[in-house]
Each structure stands twice: as structure tokens, then as C-alpha cells.
Image (cartoon, rainbow, N blue to C red):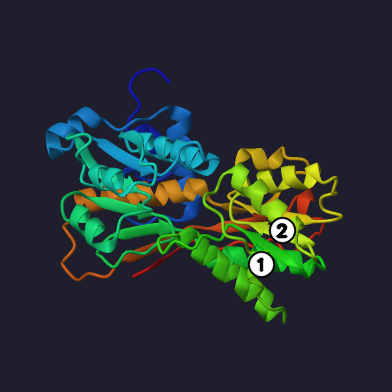
Amino acid sequence: MSGAVGLKDVAMRAGVSMRTVSNVVRGTGRASDETRQRVLRAVAELGYRPNSAARRLRTGRSGVLSLAVPDLTMPYFAELAAHLLRQAAVHGCTLLVECTGGRADAEFEIALGRTDPLVDGVILSPIALDDAAVAGAAARIPLVLLGERVHDLPATHVMIDNTAAAREATEHLLGGGRRRIAAIGRQDSPNACTSGTRLAGYRQAIEVAGLRYDPALAPPITGYHRAQGATAMRTLLALPTPPDAVFCFADALAEGALHALRERGLSVPRDVAVVGFDDVEEARYTAPPLTTVAPDKQELARLAVAALLGRIEGPDPLPGTPPTVVMARHRLVIRESSGASGRRYSTASDTIG
């Protein structure tokens, strides 16, 4: 198509009104999933980009958003950041990606927008910030939070149901006849909400199955990298009765566990079944391919960017307004590492609050 592509062109290609295209691109209004996908497909096919220069003149906004995650060397955050970059571009925005290292001071500086004065709003995955610090930041700049921890303040939190996802992963192992199921990912820090929610789901599943929770089968770890997964797996294999399955709270941990099992000459899944969490690209190429919980990263990105733009363009929330929790879908992707076919779980997105 020659010339500049406008809303009218996208509307004609998608077979919808210009208002519907505007609502989908801006993340406002209501549209069915089928309509939204049709519009976004037309946007991509035509190469449409909103006129950000005109928007700046009209609104005084820069069109610059900021994303802060704990660790970009973790594949999950790298993949999520890529989805967020694409989603920001759909809205004609620039996304600055920053790494906090999980440090409270770095999270606070970015959450306040101090690292770039042009930033209109921030998407933050906090680890160390307490409620008071997050509330102080949210009062200064539009803020959307990612992750499992819900702060008691008027902000939007975008996440999946981690407890349900962990329960479903553990139920899958139980359904394959495994009974001594270990968990790799337990962290005892009070701010370790990922660990807490996923451990809760794991415990729910084994206790409903009539099994007793054994802390020895959930050794504490210090991080969610491959090395910690391998170390924890070696600890589990040294038990008088080693596990016959292991649920890892991240795919990186599962990759480390698979390495430790290969060291011992054990077969996966014959000797030990393994399930991960995150469905990063590497999960398809491990030996054997990894069964894993797949958060809908594209939907997480869409919901987070739409929520932030709504916060930027809308009125400030009143003090005392409860947090809004927006749930994205997840599903269990069954591959060879768990050694059993089973129910494929999926949850729909929902908004609470």
C-alpha cells in the first residue's frame, strides 16, 4: 500500500469501524477477542502506526513508557519485555527497558520516573519495594505492576493465577502416577511472592491427593537460575528416598535439574518426571522437551500496556481505592519430560476489583 496508512485503511482491512480500530489501538472501550485480533492483524499487515507527534502536541505526553524488571538474563523477563516492546509500538509508544537487579533503591528510582524525565508512566515488576514505597511512587507517576504480589494501593496489577497454575502442574504429575513429588523454587524471604504462591499451589495439590507436605522435598534456594536448580536437584537426589518427580517454579530451574539428573545417569521421565514454569523458548529444546506452565505473555503485555495508557489518560484514582487485579490466561503445555498425557489446563483473563 502506498502513502501513509491511516485508521480508515485499518478499519477497511479489518471490516470494522474507525472507532473500533481507535479503541483497540488505544486499549480502551470494549471489543471481543476475535475483533481485537482482527484489528491487530490488520495493523501488522498494513504497518500502521499512530501519529505520535500529533498526539504529543494534543496531549502534552511524550509517548515514552518505562519497563523495569529484576533480571533480563532470565529468559522469562527477556521474552516478556519483547512482547511489551511490540505492544507499546502498536500504540505508537516507545518503551525504555531497565533492569533493577531486584534492588529496592533501583526499583524506587525507576518507579518515580527519575531515570528519564520524559517518561509518561511505568510498568514495574517489583521485588523489594514495600507498600509504602510503591504507594509513594504511584502518587507521582502512572504505574502498573507485574508479578504475584498485590500491593494495597489504587494501582492495576497484571498477573496470572500462579497458585492455580502450580496446582495444575502438580496435579498433572500426580495423574501420571507420581507420588513423591519435589518442588524446586522455595524461597523463605517475606518478599518472595512468586515462591509463596507457587508453593501454595503445589501443597494444595499434594494434600488433596492425600499426601503429606514434606519440607525436605522443597529445599530452599537463593535464586531462579540454572545453577540453583542443579544444586537443589542434587540435594533431592541425596535424600534416603529421592523424588520420582519434581515441579520447578521456573524453566531455568528445570534446566538445572535436568542437568543434575543427567550427571547421575538418570532417565527423564522414566526415573524422575520434570515440570517447569514459564514456557520460555528453551523449554522446547531441552532433552527431553520440557512440560511447563505457559503464561500468556502476549496477553500479559497487552493488558499491562492498555492498563498503563488508561491510567495515563484517565483521572487519578481516589485515595483508598482498592487495587485492580487483572488476570491473564495460562495453560499447561505437556511435553516429554513429564512422561504422561494429561489434562491441558487453560484459564481465561479476568478483572477483579
Does residue 103 appear to the left or right of 274 in the view shown?
left
Does residue 32 appear to the left or right of 52 in the view shown?
right
Quarter that holds the C terminus: bottom left
For badge 1, the amino acid type reads Ala
Circle nearer the N terminus (2, 1): 1
Quarter location, residue 325? bottom left
For badge 2, the amino acid type reads Leu
- Residue 114 in the image, given as x and y percentages of width and height: 19, 39
Q: Name the residue under label 2.
A: 236
- Residue at x-position 56% and y-position 61%: 186
Identify the element where label 2 is drawn: helix
Identify the element where label 1 is drawn: helix
Image position of 57 with respect to 323: above or below: above
- Residue 224 in the image, given as x and y percentages of width and height: 54, 48
Question: Counting other residues with Cα less than 10 Å from the Cα at mark 1, is it few (<14), some (14-19), or many (20 or more)?
Answer: few
Q: Nearer the viewer, residue 22 or 195?
A: 195
- Residue 19 in the image, given as x and y percentages of width and height: 31, 46
Q: Mark 1 points at which residue?
A: 216
Q: Which of 48 and 147 is in front in this view?
A: 147
- Residue at x-position 21% and y-position 34%: 116
Image position of 143 with respect to 280: above or below: below
Image position of 263 with respect to 273: above or below: above
